[in-house]
Amino acid sequence: MLETKDIPDLSQEALAQMILTKHEKLLQQYERDLTYGQRVIILAEKLDQLEHWIRDARLGEAESYANKKRETETELRLIQDTLHTNRMPKNLDEKIAQQKAAIAYWKKR
Amino acid sequence: MNEKDLKSKINDFRHEIDAREKEISALYSKLNLHKAETDKIRVARDQLNGKVKELSSRAKECRDLRDKLNREIVEHKKKHKALITDVKGLNEKIKKDKQERDKLNKTANGSEELLDRIYAKNMGILTSKDIPLEDEIRLFEQMSELTERRAAAKKATVLHNDVLSSYKQLKEYDSRIAELSAKIDSMKAESDTLHKKALEAYAEISVFRDKSNEQHKILLEKYTVTDPIRSRIDSLKEEIKRIQGEMAPFLEDFEKLSQAKVVEKRVQTAKEAMDKLKHRKRVSLDDFKVLMENGGLQVSDN
């Protein structure tokens, strides 16, 4: 947070532009979070499927499924780490809608 | 006129001259008696005049010095007046600045520091926090108002500093005015003292001048006594000159007679000496001298 007394007086246009930039960044962030969230669901399902396939695999195929499972686990871990860092909000759709509305407002302003 | 008559005439003239010279001598004795007194009066008068001159010089010195001081006082008063005018101007400025500052403070409704803090906080929220749009719009409107209030607070601070600086200047002016006033008062006192001294000197001059005039008057009275004596002396001297003039031709005639007598006697002496020489008698040195002067010896050689 800015605290110094030397903060310059901004014009309304400049301030509105800064707010707009903030909402655009937030929108990007929420949309990416949403993409990651969807990918987590897909990867979790994929792992479940791969575990099933590994159990029922014929000789010689299990190794290939195990490799894919490791790859999937690695990707999932990476995404989960990222999501953990960003503390992904629960109601992302709503948040994205709010950012879009705000962007529309500040663009007109 | 024969020698006897001439002598008698000349003696008459000499008696007349002697009589006048005696009178002159008696008149000088009289004058000398008055002179001692008039000299005393004159010395007293001159001494009094000397005192008047000395006091006049002192009075002039005092007056000149007083006038010089008065001129300096006038200059200092001008400076004093200019300073008072400056102070009035500064007071007006302070009053105006304070009024303007108070008006601005009313508009700012908060200190510059507080408003800066609120502005920074709002700015932080608006540019980095995800808040509802309604709140954002409200904060955005507040920012516009805060900008005006911050500007007012900044101006108020500038004016406040101006007022403080003016008060500092005012203090310096007060000090200079007090210093100048003290100087003027001191010079006035000095000028008054000199004025009084000059007046005292003039009063003394008046007394001495009166005394001098009195002495002069006495002196003039003395002159009324001595002047006729002097006139009489002058007149007697003129008479003596006149008598001497009248006596001169008689003296001349008498001189001529005396000379002729001497020559006649010398010729006689020479003749007698010559006779003595002819008869081979002794001749005195004086006879011989007379004989030489009359050319008797040359006659004998021939």
Image: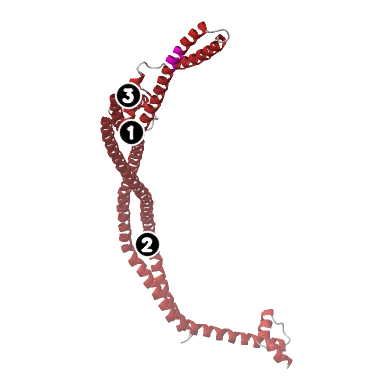
Indicate the quadrant where residue B16 lies. bottom left
Indicate the quadrant where residue B21 lies. bottom left
User: Which residue is tagged 3?
Assistant: A98
**Magenta segment range?**
A39-45
The amino acid sitting under disc 3 is: Gln
Q: CA distance from mark 1 to mark 2?
A: 140 Å
> How many numbered tags mark residues here?
3
Q: Is residue A27 magenta?
A: no
Q: Is residue B147 visible?
A: yes
| Percent x, y of residue A71 | 53, 14
Q: Disc 3 is attached to a residue of which chain? A: A
- The residue closer to the viewer here, B85 or A66, is A66
Q: CA distance from mark 2 to mark 3?
A: 148 Å
Residue in the picture at 30% in, 33% down: B148
Tell if the residue under mark 2 belongs to the same chain as the one under mark 3. no
The disc label shown at residue B30, or none: 2
The disc label shown at residue A107, or none: 1
The amino acid sitting under disc 1 is: Lys
Q: Is residue B159 visible?
A: no
Q: Residue furthest top?
A: A55
Indicate the quadrant where residue B149 lies. top left
Q: Is residue B162 above or below residue B113?
A: below
The amino acid sitting under disc 2 is: Lys
| Percent x, y of residue A22 | 38, 27
Q: Disc 2 is attached to a residue of which chain? A: B
Q: Is residue A43 magenta?
A: yes
- The residue closer to the viewer here, B183 or B28, is B183
Q: CA distance from mark 1 to mark 3?
A: 14 Å
Task: Classify mark 1: residues with Cα within 10 Å, few (<14), some (14-19) or many (20+).
Answer: few
Q: Residue furthest bottom?
A: B302
- The residue closer to the viewer here, B237 or A15, is A15
